[in-house]
Amino acid sequence: AQSVTQLDSQVPVFEEAPVELRCNYSSSVSVYLFWYVQYPNQGLQLLLKYLSGSTLVKGINGFEAEFNKSQTSFHLRKPSVHISDTAEYFCAVRRGSGGSNYKLTFGKGTLLTVNP
Amino acid sequence: SAVISQKPSRDICQRGTSLTIQCQVDSQVTMMFWYRQQPGQSLTLIATANQGSEATYESGFVIDKFPISRPNLTFSTLTVSNMSPEDSSIYLCSVDTGRLYGYTFGSGTRLTVV
């Protein structure tokens, strides 16, 4: 089974500052990793995903994440945040194989609050 | 990716009653997933619904409380039965298109039990 740990429940930052949201995973098999964003009173939107290949993954809205297999991490970064980035961010993992229809396991989420 | 229509978007229900949530996908998918997101919490998988067979429930969730139907490859329902205030949550359905390995989520059903 896979598990995900998001190390920070809340991250407050000022507008235009850089931000890193941390995510560590545990798995005995290879994994696929995802970051989702949930804006207030909305559903989940995929930010980016790592399946294979380059360990640096770029997503929407200027976010990127780096897969580090030795440290079992998949931290999310943005060099300069905006007020509109205020949201809950979820890291998720699933078994990494050629098949589909495997369930996602989510971390507890990190609330990013961008202050003016 | 797939587009999911989930209904109702929100509801306020009396304890002891049941609510059925519908999830319609614009393409055929093998598996549909039902999640619960309790207030201020992460998403927890309730069950996986495969067309033509009984749903597979995660630990802590039972069919009598959360019966699921999956009559075809584009539709599923989740019923929250005999509700109590502890069932107040957001319920979301999700699908895996099988091609992109990303999962699309419905907009969720915000349930309040009073």
Image (cartoon, coloured by chain):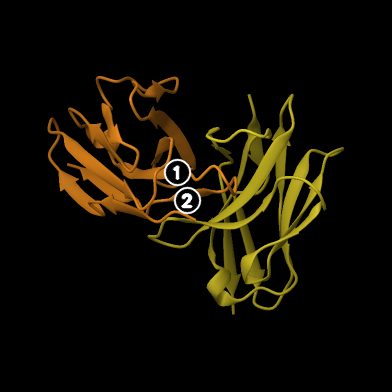
Q: Residue at x 54, y 67 (%)?
A: A86
Q: What element carries label 2?
A: strand
Q: The orange chain is which one?
A: B
Q: Name the residue under label 2.
A: B104
Q: Mark 1 points at which residue?
A: B95
For badge 2, the amino acid type reads Thr
Which quadrant does the C terminus of chain B fall into?
A: top left
Judged left or right of residue B31, residue A73 is right
Task: Using the numbered discs, state the Cα–Cα distance from disc 2 to disc 1 in whole angstroms.
Answer: 6 Å
Task: Tell me where residue A81 sits by quadrant.
Answer: bottom right
**Residue B81 in picture, x, y percent from top left:** 20, 29
Q: Which chain is yellow?
A: A
Q: Residue at x 25, y 44 (%)?
A: B22
Q: Is mark 1 on a helix, strand or loop?
A: strand
Q: Nearer the viewer, residue A65 or A96?
A: A96
Residue B37, labelled with which disc? none
